[in-house]
């Protein structure tokens, strides 16, 4: 099973981001035939990854859960906010994570990775230096569009033609670069499983375990 640890922003924070993204959608590039060059992540999949474990044998799940529970209990609820945006490798558009406890989030990432490693789950022990929430990915055909845009730009008189189509995430990233969402508080660490939900390959996240942070009542 493919597992990762994550935080889920509050409903008001996600609603605020969704409203901001409606403006970013207007900056979305399309192919000449109208097909989209951007695949937007459904809001139900929005999360902030704390640590990615990859494929974990089913038999290792109890040990992993037992290792993460005390880590969560040692961390007070985190005050965070979504702000800013950027693009990884021209393929992934993300909203950044800041707020009063952004440094604590980095420490939590390192602690989760260390605890997982202690029970034999292989994971990158480095803290995630750039916490983020993925909001979109370049769609199939985006790479070809970049090549066409470069070709047009090199032609005499080509000028800046195709700049947006050549980098379909650039416009939405610029629109979100000054984004600042409301503060929200993370009260629990989630252990999520990522699976293919249907024949389209669209991902589905299932909550495997929930670990309350310090002082948070355990949900019945």
Image (cartoon, grey):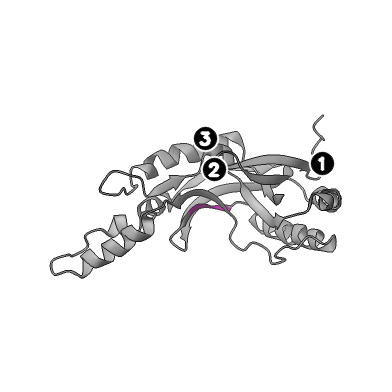
User: Does 157 sit above or below residue 98?
Assistant: below
CA gap between label 3 and label 1 equals 26 Å
Position of 147 with respect to 213 (left or right) is: left
Q: Say which label, 3 or 2, has the lower sequence index.
A: 3
Looking at the magenta stretch, what is its main secondary structure?
strand
CA gap between label 2 and label 1 equals 36 Å
Position of 28 with respect to 185 (left or right) is: left
Q: Which residue is mark 2?
A: 202
Quick one: 39 or 97, which is closer to the camera?
Answer: 39
Q: Position of residue 153 (x, y in %)?
A: 22, 66
Q: Residue at x 75, y 63 (%)?
A: 122
Q: Position of residue 184 (x, y in %)?
A: 62, 41
Q: Nearer the viewer, mark 3 or mark 1?
A: 3
Q: What label does residue 149 carry, if any?
A: none
Position of 220 with respect to 136 (left or right) is: right
Q: Which residue is mark 3?
A: 15
Q: Which residue is mark 1?
A: 215
Mark 3 in CB contact with mark 1 (< 8 angstroms): no
Range of magenta residues: 93-97
**On the rendered image, what quadrant is the C terminus found in?**
top right
Q: Residue furthest left?
A: 157
User: Does 57 sit above or below residue 208?
Assistant: below
């Amino acid at each position: 099973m493919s597992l990762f640890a994550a935080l889920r922003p509050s409903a008001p924070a996600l609603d605020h981001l969704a409203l901001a993204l409606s403006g970013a959608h207007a900056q979305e590039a399309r192919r000449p035939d109208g097909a989209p060059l951007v695949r937007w992540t459904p809001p139900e999949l929005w999360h902030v990854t704390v640590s990615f474990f990859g494929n974990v044998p089913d038999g290792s799940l109890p040990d992993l859960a037992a290792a993460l529970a005390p880590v969560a209990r040692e961390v007070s609820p985190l005050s965070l906010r979504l702000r800013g945006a950027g693009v990884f490798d021209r393929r992934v558009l993300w909203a950044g994570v800041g707020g009063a406890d952004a440094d604590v989030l980095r420490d939590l990432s390192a602690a989760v990775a260390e605890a997982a490693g202690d029970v034999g789950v292989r994971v990158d022990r480095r803290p995630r230096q750039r916490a983020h929430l993925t909001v979109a990915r370049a769609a199939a055909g985006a790479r070809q569009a970049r090549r066409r845009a470069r070709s047009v730009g090199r032609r005499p008189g080509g000028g800046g033609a195709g700049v947006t189509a050549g980098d379909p995430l650039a416009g939405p990233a610029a629109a979100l670069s000054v984004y600042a969402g409301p503060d929200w508080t993370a009260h629990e660490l989630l252990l999520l499983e990522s699976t293919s939900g249907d024949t389209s390959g669209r991902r589905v996240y299932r909550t495997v375990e929930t670990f309350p942070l310090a002082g948070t009542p355990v949900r019945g």
